[in-house]
Image (tube, rainbow, N blue to C red):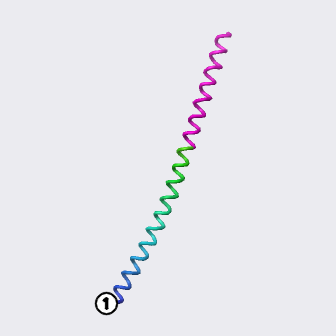
Amino acid sequence: MQATINHFESEITELKNRLAAQELEIQKSNSKFEFSVSEQEKLKKNFESEKKIWTDEKAGLVTRA
């Protein structure tokens, strides 16, 4: 009986450790994802501002022509 209890306690401890490791990996993944999204937003804003500059330059060139 005691051996069975010890076996289950050991399994519970192992499962708790695996769960903690998985939660840590999830946190790391979420952090990387959030960083990725913020970098993508920065690139999008940069592209939009460059696109506006190109449109303004094009308008100026068309006006001159």
Q: How many marks?
A: 1
Q: Residue 59: x, y in percent?
A: 62, 16
* Direction from residue 30 to residue 61 in the image, left or right: right
> Residue at left 62%, top 29%?
50
The image shows residue 19 at horizontal and vertical percentages of 43, 68
The residue shown at (46%, 68%) is 20
Residue stretch rendered in magenta on the structure = 39-65
Q: Quadrant of the N terminus?
A: bottom left
Disc 1: which residue: 1
In the image: residue 52, left or right of residue 27: right
Residue placed at 49% from the left, 58% from the top? 27
Residue at figure coordinates x 52%, y 54% from the top left: 31
The C terminus, quarter of image: top right
Queried whether the magenta region covers residue 55, the answer comes back as yes
Secondary structure at numbered mark 1: loop
Q: Residue furthest left?
A: 1
Q: Residues within 10 Å of mark 1 (few under 14, many from 20)?
A: few
The image shows residue 8, relative to residue 18, as above or below, that is: below
Residue 37 to residue 52: above or below: below
Most common SS among magenta residues: helix
- The amino acid on which the numbered mark 1 sits, given as a three-letter code, is Met
